[in-house]
Amino acid sequence: MDLELKDKVYIVTGGSKGIGEAITRMILQEGGKVMIATRSKEATSDLIAELDPQCNDLDASLGDLSHLSNCEQAISNTVSKFGRIDGVVNNAGLNDGAGLDKGPEAFRRSIEINLHHYYDMVHYALPHLKETQGSIVNVSSKVALTGQGSTSGYAAAKGAQLALTREWAADLLAFGIRVNAVLPAEVMTPLYRKWLDNSFADPAAKEAEIVQKIPLGKRMTTADEIAAMVVFLLSPKSAHTTGQFMMPDGGYVHLDRSLT
Ligand code: NAP
């Protein structure tokens, strides 16, 4: 199937590691162009060196997106480099464990690093998305629906991303801009690895325990399987899909618990 991404331009936040990296790779494979907006300098330069050292179709705007100016800069860099924006993938995030015990400052900071830039990126990209009838994909989390414990800030931000998905889908109907969310559950990425290694005395045992509870195939979802959903939602092949929450999670959130 041709996803019709040829020469279209996408911004992927956190696009050089984990799920974001898989999204970047898939867009390029489909003939699209990507501006990665991230703070991960080394991973980004390695990825560009591997995929497109001349930066013809792939470039990066570096900086912490919790600073508003870096979001504005990422949009203006994209337009200066590629001349248009066909979609925004809000993906950068961090499960920082700002739980009830950590206090108001930690909670506020968690919202700042996980939520504000989702709004800021779309705000600055909007005039360009109106020109292209672009598409927005918010990468949220199963935590928005299930909770996790000890992570109030992240859970609140992930839930708000779903609310914004519906709000923007309604707000932007008239411009033909579609807005959808993808909710990963268990995907082995650098972030997930760090969480396992830092949170449990026996990370391997914990990983085995989690995997046993994933109904389809008793395995984690791959980053490529998340990327395939995101890239489909960016593409004109999903032209009548908006305001949806997609869960490529092997049935983790919704299937009967007796199956695990
Ligand atoms: P990852 O491996 O840590 O990759 C995320 C990338 O985004 C990293 O390069 C990270 O930089 C960057 N980033 C994070 N916050 C940023 C900020 N404020 N400014 C600029 N760059 C920033 O994470 P992932 O597991 O692929 O997660 C991607 C998304 O999926 C997140 O929104 C996460 O909440 C969601 N998710 C993941 C899972 C899972 O199982 N992996 C499950 C549910 C939801 P650093 O390396 O410097 O932090």
Image: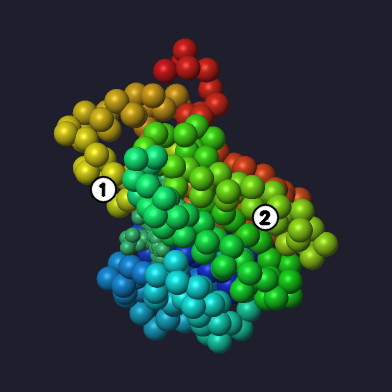
Q: Is residue 145 visible?
A: yes
Q: Residues within 10 Å of mark 1 (few under 14, many from 20)?
A: few
Q: Position of residue 175 (x, y in %)?
A: 79, 65
Vertically, is 35 above or below 30?
below
Residue lying furthest front: 104
Vertically, is 245 above or below 115?
above
How did the renderer colour the structure? rainbow
Which secondary structure lies at badge 2? strand
What residue is drawn where x is 53% and y is 69%? 11
Q: Position of residue 93 (x, y in %)?
A: 43, 55
Write down the residue under mark 2. 179
What's the amino acid at mark 1? Lys
- Measure the alpha-carbon separation of dots 2 and 1: 30 Å
Q: Position of residue 120 (x, y in %)?
A: 57, 67
Of 243 and 147, the residue lying toward us: 147
Vertically, is 90 above or below 255?
below
Of 195 and 106, the residue lying toward us: 106
Of 180 and 102, the residue lying toward us: 102
| Residue behind label 1 places its C-beta within 8 angstroms of ligand 1 | yes
What residue is drawn where x is 51% and y is 56%? 115
Residue lying furthest right: 174
What's the amino acid at mark 2? Val
Q: Position of residue 88 (x, y in %)?
A: 58, 65
Q: Which mark is residue 194?
A: 1
What residue is drawn where x is 27% and y is 33%? 207
Vertically, is 157 above or below 82?
above
Quadrant the C terminus occupies: top left
